Amino acid sequence: MQKYSLNVLMAAVAVLLLVMAQFKIIDNYIQAVIMYVGINIMMSTSLNLVNGNMGEFTCGHAAFMCVGAYVSSILSVLFFGNKFGDPIFPASMAVVVFPVIVLLGGAVAALSSILVALPSFKTRDDYLAIITIAVNYMVISAIENMDWIGGSRGFQGMKDTVWAMRDTLSAPWMLLWVILFTAFTIWVIRRFITSTYGKGVNAVCQDEVAAEIMSVNTNKIKTVNFMISAGLAGCAGGLFAHIVGYVNPQSFNILKSTEAMVMVYLGGMGSLSGAIISAVLFTGLMEVLRSAGVIKWVIIPLMLVLIMQFRPEGLLGNKELSDVFPKLKKFYTFK
Amino acid sequence: MSLLKIDSLTQRFGGLQAVSEFSVDMQGGELMGLIGPNGAGKTTIFNLISGFYQPTEGTITLDGTPTAGLRPHQVTSLGVARTFQNIRLWHDMTVLDNIRIAQHYRLGYSVWDSVLRGRKYHARETRIREIAEELLEAMSLTDVAMELPKNLPYGVQRRVEIARAMSVQPKLLLLDEPAAGLNSADVEDLIKLVRWIHDHFDITIFMIEHQMKVVTSLCQWIKVIDFGATIAEGTAEDIQSNPAVIKAYLGDDNI
Amino acid sequence: MDFIIQNILNALQWGSFYALIALGYTLVYGVLRLINFAHGDVFMVGAYIAFFVSGFMLGDTLGLSPTVTFLCALPVTMILTSLVGVTLERIAYRPLRRKGAHRLYVVITALMCGLILEYSNLAVLGASRLKFPELIHKTVWNIGGVTVTNLKVIVIVTAVLVFLFLNFIVTRTKIGMAMRGISYDKFAIPLMGIPIDNIIVFTFILGSGFAGLAGLLFAMSYPILEPFMGMLIGWKAFIAAVVGGIGDIKGAFVGGFLLGFIEVGVVALPFLESTYRDLFAFTILLIILWIKPTGLFGMPQSTKI
């Protein structure tokens, strides 16, 4: 019972949200906010895997989101749109093929993370930070130079797939997929980092030399960790592209990466529950401050500066929620 | 076949000859000491054995396998574990996790297993936990299993580090100044512990140590190096009366 | 041939801007081991300060002539910009340093300070671009088909002079010795009776002052100002510093010009579109760091066990 109580609660909330969306009890705006919460959770937890658990300082996470977004968008248009010729699959297949599209986007993003993983064997800290920034710019610049997918004008047509799903069966499909993929992300990360295999990542963070000498294959585990992180960010990108129905390379620039970093450091490095909570808070804050316009981007960095001054370990530090509030252990084991 | 065979090992850093023509042949089961003044190149030899440096010249053979070109984690998986001069535990993970992670090379499951968690994963994790708990029990560390190393006293940290090295289930254990920074009571415990490990697990131990008490009471054979070169070797008594060793440690009388 | 010389000149000019900003990055990094990510935005602020200062001087109250304005605006801009840098150090970095915070937190703070500078500028001045007044009458010399403007020459000469000046400060003076000392051991330096905070403030004054100078010169060469102008050029200058081996004055200078040549080279190649500039610049950076992770002049840090 204890083991499943939180899962059951979460599932119930998810079902409730879906039902309310289906019967239009919550409007499109709230649905969109919920979907952004999900995507931000995916972004912050996946970045947390690298910046928190592995202790690297990568600041180009949006690059992988970008790769995922574009790959899944292209596949989506190829499979169900008219832009590149006739649709390959009938519209009724969209429901089944869509998650595959998103996962493929994630897979390509994971492969692209090798660009970062290979240099990380030899170098870390500042130099790796710069490599990740460079990768972020490279990805954006590369896409801007690809005219066949719209270049800097952006790319659209993914809505065809979303409409195909809706025509098959009227349901809040995107909300469903975002919830499922968010759960998938948390599931994968949680299982990975709590296994002895994944704890090697923490060992690399705390003392890389000791890790290597105590039989942890540091190069391999770094690569695996980068790939999981980038793959999940790629999935987040794919979902984002389909929610908005339009992608533009500049929407994945360094600012987007900064957003993900803010969430990770707000929640506390290395804390999965911290990353989730801060993603929820951050999305909420962004929506509250929407009317404030540009001031939003003064307030958010200022907030992080203040966090760094007065609580540099973030909301939860490297602890999980259950360590901060031990009573929660009654309901769920986080570790 | 000898367990560790080092043949005229030489290491240069730029112009500095850190180790020159170092040779050793350990058949297995020994408890050998390596002493020498500060900066003599002792830790460099350990770094070479554990694969952290690649030797400039010479060969290291472990149980018949040459270690040239292997990365440290591969060398470790051949059965060499070590401790460090300054304790290098993973300070923000529990003692139990420290012990478990050091078994990484024989986890026996892949990333996919760690996420999907099939039967193989659970069987392996249980086994790893058992090994870890047995080891902690044997080294009387069970009480601190869930503590973070950074909160433990220095003497206990040393023990945890040795326990972590032992969880690799090594054939050869390298101890780099295990008594450094310990008080005299802790040193007594350490001597007992090392002797017990040597007898109980039947492994070969190669140790660097500055405290002569530890070396003389533990080591059957001692090698002395200075400026990278071997200047003497023999039993404790031989070494203590060897003029070259006295000269290296105390300097020349007639200055 | 003319074409090549023309492009070399352009590359030198671009490289000068990169070098000027990269020097600021590398100074602070060399002393504090801190990537001052706000530095690109300090450069932007410098350009804006130059705009307002020269606007004020040219305006009705003072009514100075453009040349006098340039000569006066130069020191004023540098002083005001270095104040911005010092303020950042005082309110954002120093408290963290005092607390002994992890380097990472300082880096994040720097990154966020950069964003704050950008967006508060956007919030205060709006998104409209500002047109920088012409301070120096543009003279164009035509030497055998190659056009050289006086501004270009000023920019290149300035960069070289600044490099020589900084190199002198760091390697030949007592304060430079203290700066190098801090980078080795932050804890031993105060025990040797060296006022560490003063040295750090001095470092920020130098770095930000020259960012202000770069801002003024950049605004004169490309007279359109917008809040995000410091972002990309700042990142690229930082990359230049890293390629050269961050923390090394010579490295930043060489790296800056190297990046200038790469970028102008890519644009000048007939079979490549200019939009590939960033892609190539960053790819080359990646390759250099791959082969030599500590940059061209950087010393590898050996791990000790």
Image: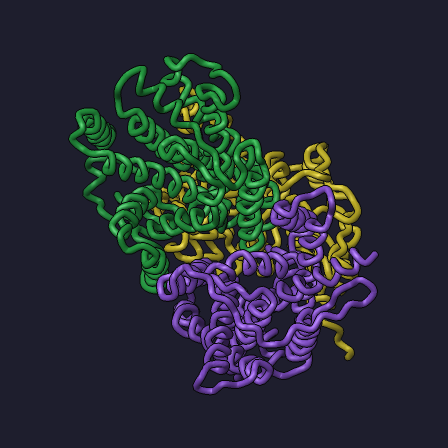
Q: Quadrant of the N terminus of chain A?
A: top left
In the image, residue B138 above or below residue B243: above
Which hue belongs to chain C? Answer: purple
The image position of residue A192, as x and y in percent, is: 42, 33
Q: Along the line of sight, which residue is nearer the eye, B224 or B239?
A: B224
Q: Along the line of sight, which residue is nearer the eye, C212 or A181?
A: C212
Q: Place residue C221 in its image quadrant.
A: bottom right
**Left or right: residue A171 compared with residue C68:** left
Number of numbered tags placed on the structure image: 0
Tell me which residue sits at (55%, 41%) in the image: A144
Residue B159 visible in the shown view: no
**Left or right: residue A316 compared with residue A46:** left
Q: Along the line of sight, which residue is nearer the eye, C146 or B163?
A: C146
Which hue belongs to chain B? Answer: yellow
The image position of residue A241, as x and y in percent, is: 41, 33
**Left or right: residue A160 compared with residue C289:** left
In the image, residue B36 above or below residue B119: below
Q: Quadrant of the C terminus of chain A?
A: top left
Tell me which residue sits at (57%, 73%) in the image: C134
The image position of residue A43, as x and y in percent, is: 39, 40
Q: Which chain is green?
A: A
The image position of residue B195, as x and y in percent, is: 53, 46
